Amino acid sequence: MKAVVMTNVGRIDQVLRIGVGLLLIALFSVGVIGAWGLIGLVPLATGLLRYCPLYQLLGIHTCGANSQRLP
């Protein structure tokens, strides 16, 4: 049986999430911002997985109608 993975984060949203996540983690790692920089793990993870639990609760899908499933 093959597992179906649903996505709700589109490509542009994904790139922005990964970029913001990496930026926050980088700023934390060089000491520019405090521990709040670790919050960058959230957008990084949701960008890499292309799934956002908050989007699911709110019924938001930023991906196209044809890209609801990852291959």
Image (cartoon, rainbow, N blue to C red):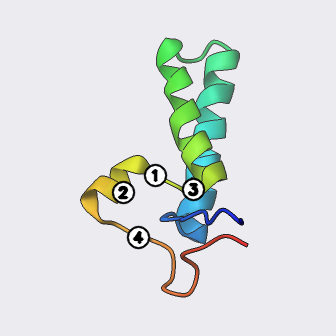
Is 19 above or below relative to 24? below
Task: Decide which of tag 2 and tag 3 comes sooner along the chain.
Answer: 3
Label drawn at residue 16? 3
Where's residue 17, x and y in %? Answer: 56, 50
Report the residue marked by disc 1: 52
As measured in the structure, the alpha-carbon distance from the residue carrying label 2 to the one carrying label 3 is 15 Å
| Residue located 61% across and 69% down the image | 11
Q: Kindly state the secondary structure of the residue where label 4 is placed.
A: loop
Report the residue marked by disc 2: 55
Q: Kindly state the secondary structure of the residue where label 2 is placed.
A: helix
Task: Decide which of tag 3 and tag 1 comes sooner along the chain.
Answer: 3
Q: Are the residues tagged 2 and 3 within 8 Å (C-beta)? A: no
Q: Are the residues tagged 2 and 4 within 8 Å (C-beta)? A: yes
Report the residue marked by disc 4: 61
Q: Nearer the viewer, mark 3 or mark 1?
A: 1
As measured in the structure, the alpha-carbon distance from the residue carrying label 4 to the one carrying label 3 is 15 Å
Q: Residue furthest front?
A: 1
As measured in the structure, the alpha-carbon distance from the residue carrying label 3 to the one carrying label 1 is 13 Å
| Residue located 48% across and 65% down the image | 8
Q: Quadrant of residue 66?
A: bottom right
Q: Kindly state the secondary structure of the residue where label 3 is placed.
A: helix
